[in-house]
């Protein structure tokens, strides 16, 4: 039976539906882990909340925008300065966040006056910033504060010199952070796209969608586009600006990387403006070559793309081959969000010779599992909404050499003296593009072959 109930889940047998081991001869119509449904009571979920999906993943990445979180201070603190999304605007978005710091009295009597005061104070504190995003949270959604009315009031009071976007997606709105992705995408499309006209400087224009500039990923993609003479209208939202994201309707092509967090707006841009959506993967030599060639075919510039690919491969492939020899047959787990599972599994296996033995998704939907299972190997284990005890059991079962996951789970596995790579923010990125694949291989090698974990497991008292 490919659906597996782990020993730690005997008291919550519903978890049987969420754990799958791939067997030979099966197809995707037979078995898929249940996903995108509420967390089962009794299991300690690794999921993020819906507010987090909107703020931490998408809106908070914009480099020229004040982020105002209308709620208790914890909602701001826990989504501030935690992701490695740098920008060329002195990392404004990493340094600053604004909270209305709602207390019990504000919840009882309403927080709209406090919100307006905070918004005006924020614009006064950063006079050069004219753009703002305001997020409702669980507390302020429950009491019914009308953040859009407050935003209109502030815009009017400041003579419409500012522009404000309101995100009405409290933490409890969905089963995971995926709901926040969806709400942000659709509301931005409906309210902001088409309200700014960009300056066009090239006959070839694109939007990069689902790219968040983790440790400079965006700069790698920009370098390729610049060499090809392609203008990027907007990054949604890595190193992006508020107004460039309002001008997304003028691109000729939407290049979608993270399909789960930003595929919604790509679909809406195609529906409303007729802009084609092209899904690519930007991790790994083969995927990057395939993605660049798809772009080249679209714009009828295959020769330029082939030249670019040849130059990049010649520069980085010899170095990658050294790491491949060292990483061959090393076992790895990927425990991240959603799409990165299927972006990375073939790259790690085909290009680095590793064996992906287990994958866990925090917020993946059924189509995400369809993709990763179709790309994954027989015998690999797939988990939706994995919890701490399940991770420990999988480690004992699969005996991985390294784990790609977030810092929370990473801190757990380090106590077992197993190396981990930050799959959310990287260790020493960027990881996208040809050079990024080399960086990822280097980090994996350094993690696996570091003596630190072996030394940490030794009791030095025995040597006395």
Image: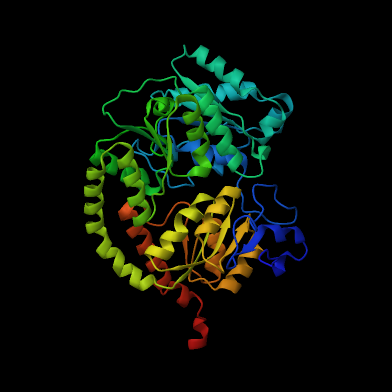
Residue 327 at x, y = what percent? 39, 70
Residue 275 visible in the picture:
yes
Q: Residue at x 42, y 70 (%)?
A: 448
| Residue 73: quarter of image | top right
Against 81, is 199 above or below?
above
Question: Nearest the camera: 347 or 464?
Answer: 347
Residue 222 visible in the picture:
no
Against 40, is 174 above or below?
above
Residue 18 at x, y = what percent? 67, 57
Q: How many numbered marks, from 0 up?
A: 0
Q: How is the image coloured?
A: rainbow
Is residue 455 toward the left or the right of residue 302 in the image? right
Looking at the rendered image, the quarter that the N terminus falls into is bottom right
Question: Nearest the camera: 320 or 107?
Answer: 320
Question: Nearest the camera: 39 or 172?
Answer: 39
Is residue 272 toward the left or the right of residue 351 in the image? right
Q: Residue at x 59, y 21 (%)?
A: 148
Residue 178 at x, y = what percent? 59, 42
Residue 109 at x, y = what percent? 72, 24
Q: Residue at x 47, y 20 (%)?
A: 163
Q: Residue at x 67, y 53 (%)?
A: 34
């Amino acid at each position: 039976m490919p659906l597996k109930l782990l020993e730690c889940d005997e008291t919550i047998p519903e978890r049987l539906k969420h754990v799958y081991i791939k067997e030979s001869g099966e197809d995707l119509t037979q078995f898929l882990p249940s996903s995108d449904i509420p967390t089962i009571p009794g299991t300690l979920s690794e999921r993020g909340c819906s507010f987090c999906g909107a703020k931490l993943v998408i809106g908070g990445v914009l480099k020229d925008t004040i982020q105002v979180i209308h709620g208790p201070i914890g909602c701001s603190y826990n989504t501030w300065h935690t992701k490695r999304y740098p920008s060329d605007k002195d990392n404004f978005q990493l340094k600053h966040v604004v909270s209305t710091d709602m207390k019990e009295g504000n919840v009882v009597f309403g927080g709209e006056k406090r919100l307006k005061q905070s918004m005006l104070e924020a614009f006064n504190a950063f006079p050069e910033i004219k753009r703002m995003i305001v997020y409702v949270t669980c507390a302020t959604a429950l009491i019914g504060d009308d953040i859009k009315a407050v935003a209109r009031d502030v815009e009017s009071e400041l003579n419409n010199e500012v522009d404000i976007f309101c995100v009405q997606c409290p933490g409890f709105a969905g089963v995971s952070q995926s709901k926040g992705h969806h709400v942000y995408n659709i509301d931005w499309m409906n309210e902001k796209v088409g309200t700014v006209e960009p300056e066009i400087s090239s006959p070839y224009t694109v939007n990069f969608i689902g790219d968040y500039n983790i440790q400079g990923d965006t700069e790698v993609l920009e370098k390729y586009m610049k060499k090809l003479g392609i203008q990027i209208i907007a990054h949604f939202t890595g190193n992006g600006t508020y107004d460039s994201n309002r001008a997304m309707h003028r691109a000729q092509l939407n290049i979608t990387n993270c399909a789960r967090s930003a595929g919604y707006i790509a679909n809406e841009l195609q529906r409303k403006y007729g802009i084609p959506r092209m899904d690519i993967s930007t991790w790994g030599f083969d995927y990057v070559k395939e993605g660049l060639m798809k772009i080249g075919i679209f714009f009828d510039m295959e020769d330029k793309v082939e030249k670019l690919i040849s130059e990049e491969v010649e520069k980085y492939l010899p170095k990658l081959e050294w790491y491949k020899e060292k990483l061959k047959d090393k076992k790895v787990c990927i425990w991240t969000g959603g799409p990165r599972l299927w972006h990375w599994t073939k790259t790690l296996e085909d290009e680095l010779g590793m064996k992906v033995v287990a994958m866990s998704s925090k917020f993946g939907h059924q189509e995400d599992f369809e993709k990763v299972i179709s790309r994954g190997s027989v015998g690999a284990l797939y988990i939706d909404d994995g919890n701490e005890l399940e991770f420990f059991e999988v480690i004992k079962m699969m005996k991985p050499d390294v784990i790609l996951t977030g810092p929370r789970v990473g801190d757990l596995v380090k106590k077992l003296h197993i190396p981990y790579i930050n799959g959310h923010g990287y260790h020493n990125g960027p990881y996208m593009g040809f050079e990024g694949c080399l960086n990822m291989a280097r980090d994996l090698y350094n993690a696996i072959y570091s003596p630190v974990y072996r030394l940490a497991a030794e009791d030095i008292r025995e040597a006395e």
